[in-house]
Image (cartoon, rainbow, N blue to C red):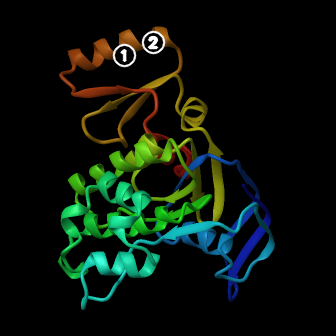
Amino acid sequence: MLEIKNLSVTYGSKVALTVPNLNINKGEIIGVMGESGSGKSTLVNSCLGLVRFKGQVTLETDNVGVLMQEQHYVDTMTNQKIIEGLLNTRIKRDDKLAELINFFDFGSQLSLHFKNLSGGQKQRMSLIMVLYQEPELLFLDEMTTGLDFESRQALINHLKVYFKQHQTVIMVTHYAQEIEQLADKLLIIHDGQVMAFDKPKNLFNQYIGYSAFIVGNNAGKSISIHQPEEEYSVARQLIDNGDDFRRTQGDIELVYTAITKGQ
């Protein structure tokens, strides 16, 4: 669905992003993680042809959808009028649109104005319009940044169901939880370089081990377990010490920290 070869993006003398080789298959959901300024949005902009670059970016489709972090619509008409006007249809005569509105629990917001929506409601409205057009390749750039926990989790739950049946998705996010719940593969970008790209479970096994114990609520304090038989003795020691801990075999924050910090 998407192939990148020898991609290089520079701003003046600064190299913002380098991607030697990257292949994303049809139907895959890719989670892209990295710090602010690491090159995540530059990757999306390169794929969309919004920045100048050297190298090759090949999309197998022209049917591409994009949802950025913030959207703005006019406040002089209701959300229903905006949706119907931009999509050139009428909800009452369009079963596909009505199903999306119902799926994202947006029916009660149709009569409101965009400025009166919460952050999560604004994102759902934009998603409805993007998904209505059935893009084969969908880019989501920081779609949940600024949302409270409940709004973010509600949106993730909706997308978890929807993505199983639909597009190839490239999802830029700061939140490990979104990767864990939605993504088939994890792409980590650090200082403009692709540091890792694989299934989260494979990356966990490679960089962390068989499992890990996270002590307290701090992902930075963890104990890696490389063989199953080690778990009991380590857990017993933590219990004897009175430590709170949890066991994991796929914590994305641990993987991200190990890869970007060189641990």
Q: Is residue 242 visible?
A: yes
In the rendered image, which quarter is residue 117 located in?
bottom left
Badge number at residue 177: none
Q: Looking at the image, do the residues carrying marks 1 and 2 touch, with CB atoms under 8 Å apart?
A: yes
Task: Give residue 228's position: percent from left, percent from top.
Answer: 49, 12
* Amino acid at dot 2: Glu
Q: Residue furthest bottom?
A: 76
In the rendered image, which quarter is residue 200 located in?
top right
- Residue that appears at 19% across and 74% down: 111
* Amino acid at dot 1: Val
Task: Give residue 76's position: percent from left, percent from top.
Answer: 24, 91
| Left or right of 45 on screen, residue 164 | left
- Which residue is more in the foreground, 65 or 103? 103
- Image: 133 above or below 220: below
Q: Secondary structure at mark 1?
A: helix
Answer few, some or many: residues within 10 Å of disc 1's Cα (few below 14, many 20 plus, some between 14 and 19).
some
Number of numbered labels in the structure image: 2
Q: Is residue 38 visible?
A: no
- Residue that appears at 21% across and 68% down: 109
| Left or right of 101 on screen, residue 34 | right
Look at mark 2 in the image and give the residue it sits on. 230
Q: Secondary structure at mark 2?
A: helix
Look at mark 1 in the image and give the residue it sits on. 234
Quadrant (top left, top right, bottom left, bottom right) of the C terminus:
top right
| Left or right of 192 on screen, residue 54 | right
Answer few, some or many: residues within 10 Å of disc 2's Cα (few below 14, many 20 plus, some between 14 and 19).
few
- Residue that appears at 40% across and 82% down: 85
Q: Residue furthest front?
A: 93
3D distance between C-alphas at marks 1 and 2: 6 Å
